[in-house]
Image (spheres, rainbow, N blue to C red):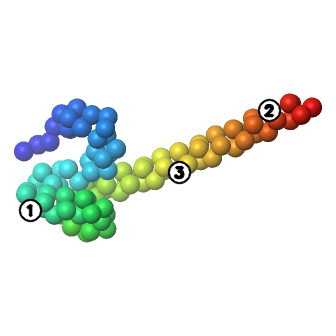
Amino acid sequence: MPLDIAQITTLVGDLGQDAYVVVKPYLPTLAREGKECFDNFIIHVLKNDWPAVNSLMYEKMTAEERRSLEDAVYKRAVDATKAKLRRKELANELWLKMAMALLTKLV
């Protein structure tokens, strides 16, 4: 049974979008492998045991699915790094503005 990614995206809405991004690379494998694989996947996800999730799923994934997973992990790491850098830049900018405001009031 092929997955309808547009329907899944609609179903999860904004609230589930973050979780959906994380599990999306595993969906084709889960659909193909059946209930036992899905149940084990859910058990490990609920325990937040991602090494177990990866070891369970990686051997069942095709080369293309593995590549998609690796690309998704890399993209999330880059996005997280950019977000951290942006927060740091905003914090520095805020401190600078506060310092300048204090200086102008003191002078």
The mark that comes first in sequence, 3 or 1, is 1
Q: Is residue 50 above or below residue 27?
A: below
Residue that numbered label 1 is attached to: 36
Q: CA distance from mark 3 to mark 2?
A: 30 Å
Q: Is residue 40 visible?
A: yes
Identified at 17% across, 55% down, the residue is: 29
Amino acid at the residue labelled 2: Ala
Labelled pair 3, 2 in contact (Cβ < 8 Å) = no
Q: Which of the labelled discs sits on residue 14, or is there none? A: none
Q: Is residue 54 visible?
A: no
Amino acid at the residue labelled 3: Thr
**Residue 12 locus on image (x, y percent):** 24, 38
Q: Nearer the viewer, residue 61 or 49?
A: 49
The mark that comes first in sequence, 3 or 2, is 3
**Residue 71 locus on image (x, y percent):** 37, 52
Q: CA distance from mark 1 to mark 2?
A: 62 Å
Residue that numbered label 2 is attached to: 101
Q: CA distance from mark 3 to mark 1?
A: 36 Å
Residue that numbered label 3 is attached to: 81
Q: Secondary structure at mark 2?
A: helix
Q: Secondary structure at mark 3?
A: helix
Task: Tell me if mark 3 has few (under 14), some (14-19) or many (20+) residues whose alpha carbon lies within 10 angstroms of its own.
Answer: few
**Residue 95 locus on image (x, y percent):** 72, 41
